[in-house]
Image (cartoon, helix red, strand yellow):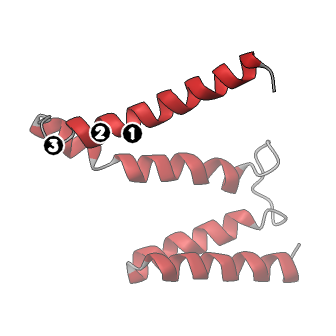
Amino acid sequence: MNAEWALTLAGMVAVTYGIRLSFLVFGHSVKFPAWLERALRYVPAAVLTALIAPMALAPQGAMDVSLHNAYLPGTIAAIAVALWTRQTLAAILGGFIVYGLWRWLVV
């Protein structure tokens, strides 16, 4: 590994852990406005949606809402189970079961 790669890697480590460490060091002394704290409550759901929606709707890089896309019914089942039971593990298992059965029986 040459020096340029080592410096790049060291810089990436410093930036990544510097950002994380800043929240641990300064997080207790910083007070956010109430409107920002309310808005930040939606960040996990927004990030999860941004990660899951492209996989469910376009698993091969193009929009696919056909019967051959097993991700879509698996995702819909996981959402339904999550809304019904309010349990994360049940939603994950329900989604995996529907996805697996769809791949086995339909695709």
As drawn, the label of residue 28 is 3
- Residue type at mark 3? His
The residue singled out by tag 1 in the image is 20
Query: Where is the C terminus found, in terms of image quarters?
Result: bottom right
As drawn, the label of residue 67 is none
Q: Position of residue 19 (x, y in %)?
A: 39, 32
- Residue type at mark 2? Phe
Q: Disc 2, disc 3: CB below 8 Å?
A: no
As drawn, the label of residue 23 is 2
Q: Is residue 67 above or below residue 47?
A: below
Q: CA distance from mark 3 to mark 1?
A: 13 Å
In the visual, does 84 lie left or right of 99?
left
Query: Where is the N terminus found, in terms of image quarters?
Result: top right
Badge 1 marks a residue whose secondary structure is helix
Q: Residue at x 81, y 66 (%)?
A: 67
Q: Is residue 27 above or below residue 94?
A: above
- Residue type at mark 1? Arg
In the visual, does 27 lie left or right of 93?
left
Numbered marks: total: 3
